[in-house]
Image (spheres, grey):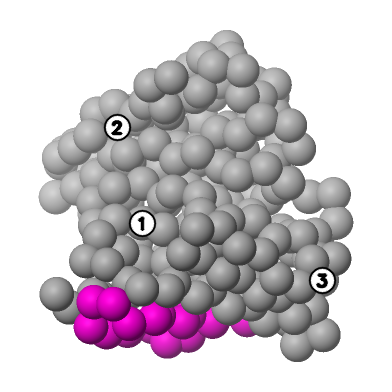
Amino acid sequence: SQQGEEDPQALSIQEGENATMNCSYKTSINNLQWYRQNSGRGLVHLILIRSNEREKHSGRLRVTLDTSKKSSSLLITASRAADTASYFCATDPNFGNEKLTFGTGTRLTIIP
Amino acid sequence: DAGVIQSPRHEVTEMGQEVTLRCKPISGHDYLFWYRQTMMRGLELLIYFNNNVPIDDSGMPEDRFSAKMPNASFSTLKIQPSEPRDSAVYFCASTAGTGAFYEQYFGPGTRLTVT
């Protein structure tokens, strides 16, 4: 099974609304990262949050991490049509391991 | 910087043929990763290199798959012989430093179709 499971699998909202996506994982982690993938393109890194951090901001993005619940959320505020993409969380499941395990992704559609 | 470069962008081949995918990582990056993405299985790590040395190939599905990194600026992923179930998008990514602590930079991918 996936180390990271995003929820929901798909989300459609009106432009200007906020979008929230969640990620759950199973094992202890060093950090958690969020990536965006536009249709037909490679993944693009959005934000990284370390295991000793609880919240991080980057522009219109806000990420929270709850290691006790093994979960993270990505909030995109004031959504734009250009935010339409798939969003993936990625974790490094073993300390000192360079491998990232990606979740199943949330497909976000922003309706103009 | 041009980013991670992959070629070809699209490849259509017949079952049984040899397929070679190519990747040029970002200059100065010492980690290189090969991923495969399908609707059914999502994004899977196949193999990764550190300083041109393969570190973990546990994700390589079968002996039909092989990967090399002859130098810091070039890597190949070869499938021989190819099968229809190999159809997927293959991504190469690179990063600097300790791989999991730093963001990975992905190439645009190679869409492989095996008929």
In this image, B7 relative to A25: left or right? left
Q: Residue A28 carries which label?
A: 3
**Tally of numbered discs:** 3
Q: Vertically, is B77 above or below A84?
A: above
Graded by Cα atoms within 10 Å as few (under 14), some (14 to 19) or many (20 or more), the crowding at tag 3 reads some
Residues at marks 1 and 3 touching, judged by CB atoms closer than 8 Å: no
Mark-to-mark CA distance, 1 and 3 = 25 Å
Are the residues flagged by discs 2 and 1 from a single subunit? Answer: no
N-terminal label among 1 and 3: 3
Disc 3 residue type?
Ser
- Please identify, in this view, whether the residue under mark 3 or under mark 2 is nearer the observer: 3
Mark 3, chain letter? A
Q: Residue at point 85% right, 56% down? A: A95
Q: Residue at point 64% right, 56% down? A: A48
Helix, strand or loop at label 2? It is strand
Are the residues flagged by discs 3 and 2 from a single subunit? Answer: no
Disc 2 residue type?
Val
Q: Which of B69 and B27 is in front in this view?
A: B27
Per the rendered image, the range of residues in magenta is A7-27
**The stretch drawn in magenta includes residue A10:** yes
